[in-house]
Image: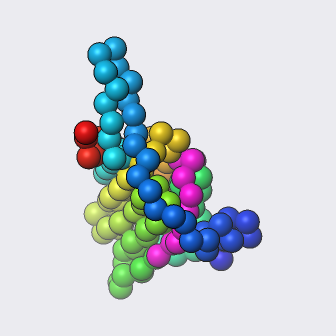
Amino acid sequence: MLKDKAIAKKMMQKTKRSIEWVIRRTTRNNLKYAGVHVVADFWNGKPIEDAPVLREILVKAAQAAHATPLEVSIHKFSPQGITGVVLLAESHIAVHSWPEYNYIAVDIFTCGDKSAPQKALDYLKQELRPRKVESKKINRGAV
């Protein structure tokens, strides 16, 4: 259960979907993207197997990204592994673990100029303490 009741209430609110373009200003023009997608591989970090702990980490990662959490879904696999997704008004953050390989896959997709997916990634690095990180940023839906 979320510790902050205000966050839980906000997550339950329905939001109106509209596209908010991410605008990257350059010296030549203003490039527009539907969103920014950050994918990362975490190796040899803190193992995560507890659903309430992962739920809290996902919500805090969303807050770090200046995003609005709407819903969180967690699935614990048997005998090990866990997947968690927080749906955002601005898209999603997902974490998938393979403890038998000391590996966690991270997926952060946000839209709008106010969201900051790199800050969510930085928070997840801080919490999960991987020894090795490989990440890539993709600008999605360029117009």
Q: Quadrant of the C terminus?
A: top left
Looking at the image, residue 28 sits to the left or right of residue 125; the answer is left
Quadrant location of residue 135?
A: top left
Q: Closer to the camera, 101 or 10?
A: 10
Q: Which residues are magenta?
A: 64-73
- Residue 104 in percent (x, y) is at 35, 59
- Residue 81 in percent (x, y) is at 37, 74
Quadrant location of residue 26?
A: top left
Name the residue: 66% across, 71% down.
8
Looking at the image, residue 131 sits to the left or right of residue 10; the answer is left
Name the residue: 48% across, 66% down.
86
Asked if one can make out residue 112 in the rendered structure from this viewpoint, the answer is yes
> Which color scheme is applied?
rainbow
- Residue 92 in percent (x, y) is at 42, 60
Q: Closer to the camera, 138 or 28?
A: 28
Asked if one can make out residue 93 in the rendered structure from this viewpoint, the answer is no
Q: Is residue 70 magenta?
A: yes
Looking at the image, residue 113 sits to the left or right of residue 52; the answer is left
Looking at the image, residue 52 sits to the left or right of residue 42; the answer is right
Q: Quadrant of the N terminus?
A: bottom right
Name the residue: 46% across, 62% down.
17
- Using the image, determine if residue 35 lies above or below residue 49: above
Q: Closer to the camera, 53 or 2?
A: 2
Residue found farthest to the bottom: 78
